[in-house]
Image (spheres, coloured by chain):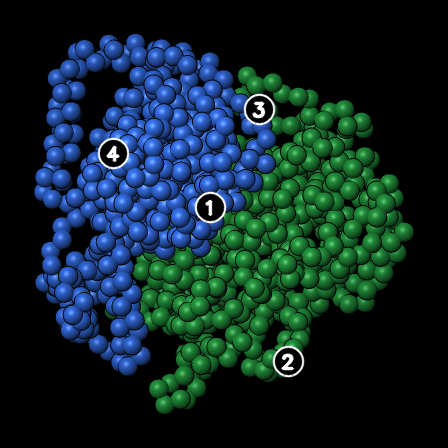
Chain colours: A blue, B green
């Protein structure tokens, strides 16, 4: 079953905000893998999760609980309840409209969670079809193969043919009883999972073509209105208090030897229905394109595990969460250098974004201002968990390639290329 | 392209344009402000002795830089202090910075630093003194000491780099190669095109690689009573209210200083043991080659991508090379080697051209010097302190120096690697530290790397323009 992404979005009771922050920061984040609230490692379907507070806005204070897991939803929720009922009860007891009487009220807690699910308008998955279990299994296999090859190099320093080396690796794995799964076929996507989004994208293009006579005048009017607006949108040169704010944000960054990081980001849309419709449409299109990405790249960026864009508060705000590889600076550089059109088209509909030219142009090209804007809108991530903190999107793919091609038919040159993967 | 004007060159401290290779003797005097009024008077007198980028001095040179603490001590107004960049304000020793720079292990922790750390006296001012020989340096030091001691300043620590016989650092490799050249200056004369960077990558307020003026600290118009400072660069967004300011940063830069102790015996012993032949015999050629694989250049400086099998002194200064076409897989120069990490050139990214653009946004001008005598026997730990005073210049510490250290050198998954960091300056903390030497068909992994380099101190400085020095002296 494919991976799923969603957030539980709940409003915090004003008098419980401090208590909840304490639970998140002191009880959970400080003991991430072993806390009495959310025993993350016991959630066998969970890839990445985060909890953070969006505090004191005109919309009140929110608790956002981000989940990226192996579907189906019912199974995930069942496991979440079984493993974490008392913790969920304490956490959501701090939120509005929560009525479950006790942790034993299974129906009450699950109904509350379901009611507060926000499904993203657009999302990205870096390693489609790789479950948590498969990711960990293949990573373990890679480690064993690396050790085997270390011994091999030590014993027979040079002069071996690639095919022969590969043969020895195959024999080694075949002899391991615990590695029987390696040979079993495990496609990353079913044919249908691969085909459906492409068919939809194709149909969309055909439909757009057929509707051109209507779309062209609409687009012209839209472009004129857009240009009028984007020339007049206020763009600040400086953000207040940015040094102190960023100082707080980076406290949580780069905990895992800089392999992975989390970004939570909340922006307010520019006023008016025009921007709301534009953003909705852009995200709808982004999602279409993202569904056809099976190489793990989002607009050319190879380092995003899971990302969601969700329009919340009746489309007045945009929530973005991302679980990415490398440093924040590098991630933002990638945005600027590789994906500036796409992300400018999304975020230029939100306040304070650097000035744009016809929705896509300029904007993020203004590197320093774009980074200052991104930091200004970033929300402190109170709790962040990953089931495999030392693996990148690229490594996970490489591990899958190593496994999938271990027994595949290969001539000398294919065997050689396979060995280059180590 | 805009040429820097002669009046700007007169305003820029000489250390930006030159590492003073003709002046082999150095002393770095770290000072603290005891009396602000007296210190401003001292600075006023010092300005005329500061070497500018126009006035090359044959016998000795002097430059001066300040920390955030120092600017505060001199009495710079709060709004101006707050307009400096975040790393400079916070300093090098914050917990987050320790994580990204690799200073969060027992050896490197700022808690143990000799200077600039959490348990040492704050540094306010750095006086950089360069001289052609030891006697000249001694007399310059004596002269300057007499002046600052009566000028409201006290010495915190003085670091001597001493005279080194050549440009090779203590592990034996030619250092200071592969520098970027600032567009619009004489530095571009012999530089490969790919090494030319916008002036705003080094000098504040100049146009940077994004086509925008590099962020620069500003003072209030009222505080610039003598009209010493230039106007700020025009704002790109005219619709936001702009207080009347003057530009304190123009023609200045940020100076990063890290003292890196090098454990030469540990390094050489490790190389010997890692390359022992099966029968236990030493293999000096393999040992030399492994060291070159760590670095990415041979000892002469010849790059491995151009000369993969043996050193070639003819290529000692070669810098016009890239990786993608000739060594995409790292068979010649390992992906994780020090020079490939600290400047990946065209190797990271969808295309060579895009990769180069991105890599060039993270360049630094290195101005380091070795310190301590060479050991008599490189395999014996003689207990003598030696290493590298790593100094570099950049206009955006976060995007340049810190990025290189964090995203490239300390990144365990750099360029598709799997759990290893820069063998020289990386944060080796995980127990079994590995280094992969890619080869065709099969790589070799070197295990159990030790920490060959230890950080002994560090700080971020602002290297002001001459006008900014005059402004600070007149506060």
Q: How far apart are the two marked residues, 2 and 4, measured between alpha carbons?
A: 72 Å
Circle 2/circle 4 CB separation < 8 Å: no
Q: How far apart are the two marked residues, 1 and 3, measured between alpha carbons?
A: 46 Å
State whether residue B293 is above or below residue A1: below
Quarter-of-image position of residue B278: bottom left
Asked whether residue A371 is in view, the answer is no
Quarter-of-image position of residue A314: top left
Q: Nearer the viewer, mark 4 or mark 3?
A: 4
The residue beneath circle 4 is: A107
Within 10 Å of the Cα at label 4, are there few (<14), some (14-19), or many (20+) other Cα atoms?
few
What residue appears at the point 80 percent right and 56 percent down from the top-left corner? B155
Where, quadrant-wise, is the C terminus of chain B in this rendering?
A: top right
Tell me which label, 3 or 2, sits earlier in the chain. 3
User: Residue B425, position in %: x, y?
Assistant: 52, 62
Q: For numbered disc 3, what is the local secondary structure?
A: loop
Q: How far apart are the two marked residues, 1 and 4, measured between alpha carbons?
A: 26 Å
Quarter-of-image position of residue B23: bottom right
Residue B42 is left or right of residue A175, and the answer is: right
Within 10 Å of the Cα at label 2, are there few (<14), some (14-19), or many (20+) other Cα atoms?
few
**Residue A27: assigned label:** 1
Q: Are marks 4 and 3 on the same chain?
A: no
Q: How far apart are the two marked residues, 4 and 3, measured between alpha carbons?
A: 58 Å
Tell me which label, 1 or 4, sits earlier in the chain. 1
Residue B116 is left or right of residue B418, and the answer is: right
Q: Are marks 3 and 2 on the same chain?
A: yes
What residue appears at the point 37 percent right and 21 percent down from the top-left corner? A313
Instruction: Find the residue positioned furthest to the right.
Output: B150
Q: Which chain letter matches label 1?
A: A
Q: Which chain letter matches label 3?
A: B
The residue beneath circle 2 is: B382
Q: Are marks 2 and 4 on the same chain?
A: no
**Residue B235: assigned label:** 3
């Amino acid at each position: 079953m494919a991976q799923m992404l969603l957030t539980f979005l709940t409003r915090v009771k004003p008098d419980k905000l401090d208590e909840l922050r304490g639970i998140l920061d002191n009880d959970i984040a400080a003991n991430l893998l072993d806390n009495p609230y959310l025993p993350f490692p016991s959630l066998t379907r969970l890839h990445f999760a985060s909890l953070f507070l969006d505090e004191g806005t005109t919309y009140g204070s929110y608790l956002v609980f981000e989940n990226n897991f192996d579907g189906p939803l019912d199974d995930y929720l069942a496991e979440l309840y079984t493993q974490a009922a008392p913790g969920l009860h304490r956490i959501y007891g701090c939120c509005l409209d929560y009525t479950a009487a006790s942790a034993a009220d299974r129906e009450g807690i699950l109904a509350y969670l379901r009611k507060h699910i926000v499904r993203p308008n657009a999302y990205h998955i870096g390693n489609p079809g790789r479950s948590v279990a498969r990711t960990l299994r293949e990573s373990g296999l890679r480690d064993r193969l690396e050790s085997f090859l270390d011994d091999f190099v030590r014993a027979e320093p040079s002069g071996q043919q690639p095919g022969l080396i590969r043969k020895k690796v195959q024999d080694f794995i075949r002899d391991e009883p615990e590695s029987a799964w390696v040979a079993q076929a495990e496609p990353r996507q079913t044919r249908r999972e691969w085909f459906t989004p492409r068919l939809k994208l194709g149909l969309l293009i055909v439909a757009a073509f057929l509707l051109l006579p209507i779309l062209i005048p609409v687009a012209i009017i839209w472009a004129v209105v857009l240009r009028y607006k984007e020339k007049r949108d206020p763009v600040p040169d400086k953000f207040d208090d940015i040094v102190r704010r960023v100082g707080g944000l980076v406290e949580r960054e780069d905990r895992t030897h800089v392999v992975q990081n989390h970004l939570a980001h909340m922006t307010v849309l520019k006023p008016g229905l025009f921007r709301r419709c534009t953003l909705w449409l852009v995200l709808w299109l982004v999602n279409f394109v993202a569904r056809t990405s099976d190489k793990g790249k989002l607009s050319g960026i190879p380092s995003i595990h899971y990302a969601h864009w969700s329009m919340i508060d009746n489309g007045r705000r945009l929530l973005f969460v991302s679980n990415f590889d490398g440093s924040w600076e590098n991630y933002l550089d990638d945005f600027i250098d590789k994906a500036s059109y796409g992300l400018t088209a999304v975020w230029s509909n939100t306040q304070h974004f650097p000035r744009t030219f016809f929705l896509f142009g300029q904007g993020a090209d203004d590197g320093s201002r774009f980074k200052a804007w991104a930091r200004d809108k970033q929300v402190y991530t109170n709790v962040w968990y990953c089931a495999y903190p030392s693996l990148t999107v690229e490594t996970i793919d490489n591990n899958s390639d190593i496994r999938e091609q271990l027994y595949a038919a290969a001539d000398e040159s294919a065997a050689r290329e396979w060995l280059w993967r180590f | 392209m805009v040429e820097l004007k002669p009046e700007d060159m007169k305003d820029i401290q000489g250390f930006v344009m030159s590492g003073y290779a003709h002046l082999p003797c150095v002393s770095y005097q770290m000072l603290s402000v005891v009396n602000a009024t007296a210190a401003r008077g001292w600075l006023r007198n010092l300005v005329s002795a500061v070497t500018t980028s126009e006035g090359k001095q044959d016998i000795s040179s002097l430059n001066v830089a300040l920390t955030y603490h120092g600017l505060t001590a001199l009495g710079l107004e709060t709004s101006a202090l707050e307009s400096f960049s975040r790393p400079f304000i916070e300093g090098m020793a914050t917990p987050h910075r320790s994580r990204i720079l690799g200073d969060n292990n027992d050896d490197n922790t700022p808690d143990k630093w000799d200077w600039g750390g959490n348990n040492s006296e704050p540094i306010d001012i750095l006086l950089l003194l360069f001289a052609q020989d030891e006697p000249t340096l001694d007399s310059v030091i004596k002269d300057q000491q007499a002046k600052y001691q009566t000028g409201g300043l006290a010495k915190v620590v003085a670091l001597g780099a001493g005279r080194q016989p050549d440009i090779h650092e203590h592990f034996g490799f030619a250092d200071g190669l592969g520098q970027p050249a600032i567009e619009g200056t004489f530095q571009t004369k012999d530089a490969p095109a790919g090494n030319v960077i916008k002036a705003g990558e080094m000098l504040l307020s100049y146009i940077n690689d994004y086509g925008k003026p590099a962020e620069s600290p500003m003072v209030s118009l009222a505080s610039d009573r003598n009209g010493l400072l230039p106007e700020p660069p025009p704002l790109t967004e005219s619709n936001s209210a702009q207080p009347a300011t003057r530009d304190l940063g123009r023609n200045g830069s940020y100076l990063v200083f890290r003292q890196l102790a090098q454990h030469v015996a540990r390094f050489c012993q490790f190389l010997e043991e890692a390359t022992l032949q099966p029968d236990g015999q030493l293999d000096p050629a393999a040992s030399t080659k492994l060291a070159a694989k760590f670095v990415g250049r041979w000892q002469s400086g010849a790059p491995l991508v151009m000369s993969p099998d043996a050193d070639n002194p003819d290529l000692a200064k070669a810098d016009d090379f890239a990786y993608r076409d000739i060594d995409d897989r790292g068979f010649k120069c390992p992906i994780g080697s020090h020079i490939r990490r600290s400047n990946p050139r065209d190797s990271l990214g969808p295309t060579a051209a895009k990769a180069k653009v991105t890599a060039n946004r993270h360049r630094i001008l290195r101005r380091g010097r070795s310190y301590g005598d060479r050991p008599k026997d490189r395999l014996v730990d003689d207990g003598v302190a030696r290493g590298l005073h790593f100094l570099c210049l950049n206009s955006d510490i976060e995007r340049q120096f810190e990025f290189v250290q964090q995203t490239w050198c300390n990144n365990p998954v750099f360029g598709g690697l799997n759990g290893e960091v820069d063998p020289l300056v990386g944060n080796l903390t995980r127990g079994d530290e590995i280094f992969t030497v890619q080869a065709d068909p099969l790589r070799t992994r070197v295990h159990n790397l030790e920490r060959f380099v230890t950080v002994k101190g560090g700080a971020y400085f602002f290297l002001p323009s001459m006008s900014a020095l005059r402004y600070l002296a007149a506060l």
